[in-house]
Amino acid sequence: MLADDVAGLLLAARTEIGSSYPSLTPDIAALHLFERVLYEKFAILPEGHPWLKPVRFDNPAGPGVGEMNFYRIDGDEVHEVAVGPIHAGVIECGHFRFQCLGEEVLYLEISLGYHHRGVEAMLTGGPLARILPLIETVAGDSTAAHAFACCTLLEGLSETLPSPRGQHIRALALELERLACHTGDIGAIAGDVGFLPTSAFCGRLRGDWLNMSAMLCGSRFSRGLFVSGGTAFDLDPALAHVLTDKVVLAARDVQGAVRLIWNSPSVMARLTGIGVLPASVAASLGVVGPPARASGLARDARRSHPLPCLPALEKICVADRGDVGDRTALRYDEALASAALCQNILKDLPAGGCRAEKQEKIYALAPKHIAVALVEGWRGEVCHVALTDEFGHFAAYSIVDPSFHNWAGLAYALRRQQISDFPLCNKSFNLSYCGHDL
């Protein structure tokens, strides 16, 4: 699958490749993980691939989890620092291996796959009655994004037009998820540099955004809201009015909390010039979402591939330095834009029911079809692709979380940085382990 963002097109191609093919990675670096996954899952060899390391340790006949060779730099004063895979607190498993000269990081290698759950394999043969609860666990902080993508895919395969009202309520949930996560990330970045006022304010404000999601459906993470054809819960005028007031107040408070950062030269000095990801590198690696836009790449699926019944995003927020400061500022700009979008949705909710009329069709999928769904979650584009067999069952279901694209960008951003800057850089990307491991 290829996306033409300028023309707003998704292009599908197929070929018979047998057991091997010439690797495309030497020419297109962004494909390196995709080729490794194909090799790991189907034993299709990309001849000439620079390094076929395991991605999720998906092959039962392959090495055990974490058993692999790592890149190594030799030298009298070069030393290696290994972090993880077990971390403190509730952080998931991931292994980070730094090659350092003194405090300077020469190279960072990131190895994941410790929590591979086999989600895609569980979806094959479906759709199962529990498909949406299963999808909601792909990445818990991106529940709305993944559930939205799955519903779009099911509706495409069953030729079901979603309820316009339900589609707008879904968009509202997606933006509330973006607001909660962007606000939380800004607070976490402030906390990483020891600036507690913004850290404390944003921690509280993240809870306000999550509570608004709970007002929609009873779950702070929008679980149970998304159903094929629309939403399980409607919005009455009184609740829409209350939510509008809460969005306005929370957006105002976010501005106050973040303004403390902009007015603190010591904090700005700590964020500026750290963890730079140049635009050319971001483009080469296929980075998406806020890290791409902070590097100057105007990539946003809400603009290039708008979902049915929803207008295209009018303006994409971008920055140009590609450092931690820009990734922080971009989240702030996107949070304000998202709050304005929420207000517009609440003001102009379409009339009618929140679910499609013909619910019985939704799990009757067209045989021998392919469907693709692109949803711009808070981390970046979430992509779901499904193929059906002659009976209308899933012959294959593939999920690409934005983190899958972006871990390589984080590794690059650490080059020539102080190793003590890793937590700050890591937080400015805030990538998902489980979204990668699936």
Image: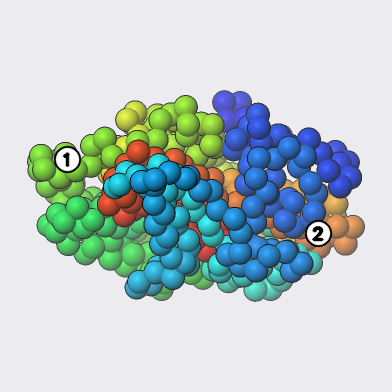
* x then y, percent, for residue 437: 57, 61
Give the residue at x 85% y 52%. Answer: 368
* x then y, percent, for residue 102: 30, 47
Looking at the image, can residue 162 be seen?
Answer: no
- Asked whether 30 or 179 is in front, the reply is 30
**Mark in front: 1 vs 2:** 1
Q: Which mark is residue 268?
A: 1
Residue occupied by mark 2: 395
Looking at the image, which residue sits at the far front?
A: 76
- Mark 1 vs mark 2, CA separation in Å: 51 Å
Side of 47 relative to 146 (left or right): right
Give the residue at x 66% y 36%. Answer: 25
Q: Is residue 274 above or below residue 143?
A: above
Side of 222 relative to 182 (left or right): right
Dot 2 amino acid type: Ala
Few, some or many C-alpha atoms within 10 Å of disc 1 (few <14, some 14-19, many ≥20)? some
Is label 1 in contact with label 2 (beta carbons under 8 Å)?
no
Q: Secondary structure at mark 2?
A: strand
